[in-house]
Image (cartoon, rainbow, N blue to C red):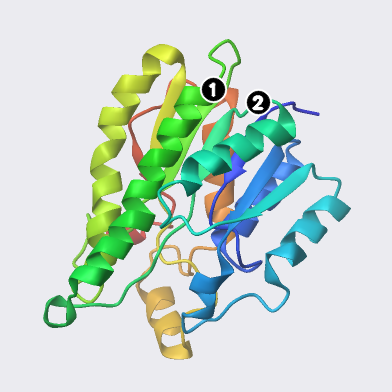
């Protein structure tokens, strides 16, 4: 069993990407600190997981996982450092960060508000950078496998005019990847960004599901497990020379 410890943020729903990542990492022997913030999902059209984040924690522990859980609003500027400290206190060290959390926002130019811009940047960009800062400050460089992974969206492949606060904050992460990678590689910490493409996590209606399936060269939607496989590889020793990259796992969606 691996003694490596990974923080996975944004694991509030068992159907979504964070849960799939956690399942894969537990299966691979990692200890995992799960982060969730169910109130965000409760305010979205898809709603919160009926079992709450605790249902995922119970599932992973029944599978033999060494799992701890923290519920925290990452709009709080103190939450990222507290999250990393909790992981280190629980497991003794922290080897990797998978910043999967996201605040979704449907605002076009005419609907745009300063409040939503601030909130989206606070959660999607500021919290992710502060998580990376706290992780790097507490990481033991004598241990192998230092990793930072975060998620962008498809804004660098095609227009998303109805989601301006979301894509602005995700685009910032995309552009930050190379700079942070150069800064941390001398310490043996890699930094990479993942674009998971359209993922079937319960938000799409039948019409959208059919349209994406038709347009995707792979003939289907991405599944959370597709992203989890890429995460698992990027966390592995085989990926220790891959850094500063934005990688799409989307069946050719972004290559059309």
Q: Secondary structure under badge 1? A: loop
Quadrant of the drawing holding the C terminus: bottom left
To which residue does mark 2 refer?
A: 93
Residue 135, compared with residue 19, is above or below; it is above
- Tell me which numbered mark, 2 or 1, is placed earlier along the sequence: 2
Lateral position of residue 179 relative to residue 189, left or right? left
Lateral position of residue 107 relative to residue 62, left or right? left
Q: How many marks?
A: 2
Residue 38, compared with residue 108, is above or below; it is above
Q: Position of residue 133 (x, y in %)?
A: 41, 32
Q: Residue furthest left?
A: 110
Q: Position of residue 106 (x, y in %)?
A: 29, 77
To which residue does mark 1 refer?
A: 139
- Residue visible at 73% across and 74% down in the picture: 51
Q: Quadrant of residue 50?
A: bottom right
Q: Quadrant of residue 91?
A: top right
Q: Nearer the viewer, residue 170 or 124?
A: 124
- Whether residue 210 appears in this view of the structure is yes
Q: Nearer the viewer, residue 242 or 76?
A: 76
- Whether residue 239 appears in this view of the structure is no
Q: CA distance from mark 2 to mark 1?
A: 7 Å
Residue 204, compared with residue 146, is above or below; it is below
- Residue visible at 54% across and 79% down in the picture: 42
The reply to whether callout 2 and callout 1 are in contact (CB within 8 Å) is yes
Q: Position of residue 236 (x, y in %)?
A: 59, 29
Q: Residues within 10 Å of mark 1 (few under 14, many from 20)?
A: many
Q: Secondary structure under badge 2? A: loop
Q: Residues within 10 Å of mark 2 (few under 14, many from 20)?
A: many
Lateral position of residue 19 relative to residue 111, left or right? right
């Amino acid at each position: 069993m691996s003694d490596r410890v990974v923080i996975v943020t944004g694991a509030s729903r068992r159907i979504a990407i964070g849960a799939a990542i956690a399942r894969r990492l537990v299966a691979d022997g990692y200890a995992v600190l799960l982060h969730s913030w169910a109130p965000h999902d409760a305010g979205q059209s898809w709603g919160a997981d009926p079992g709450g984040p605790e249902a995922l924690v119970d599932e992973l522990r029944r599978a033999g996982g060494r799992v701890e859980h923290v519920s925290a609003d990452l709009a709080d500027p103190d939450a990222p450092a507290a999250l990393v400290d909790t992981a280190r206190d629980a497991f003794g060290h922290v080897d990797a960060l998978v910043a999967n959390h996201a605040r979704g926002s449907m605002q076009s130019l005419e609907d745009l508000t300063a409040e939503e811009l601030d909130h989206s940047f606070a959660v999607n960009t500021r919290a992710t950078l502060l998580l990376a800062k706290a992780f790097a400050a507490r990481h033991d460089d004598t241990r192998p496998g230092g990793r930072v992974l975060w998620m962008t969206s498809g804004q660098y492949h095609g227009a998303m005019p109805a989601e301006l606060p979301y894509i602005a904050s995700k685009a910032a992460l995309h552009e930050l990847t190379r700079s942070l990678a150069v800064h941390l590689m001398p310490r043996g910490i890699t930094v990479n960004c993942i674009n998971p493409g359209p993922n079937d996590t319960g938000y799409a209606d039948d019409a959208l599901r059919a349209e994406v399936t038709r347009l995707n060269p792979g003939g289907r939607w991405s599944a959370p497990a597709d992203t989890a496989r890429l995460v698992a590889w990027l966390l592995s020793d085989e990926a220790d020379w891959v850094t500063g990259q934005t990688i799409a796992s989307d069946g050719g969606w972004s290559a059309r």
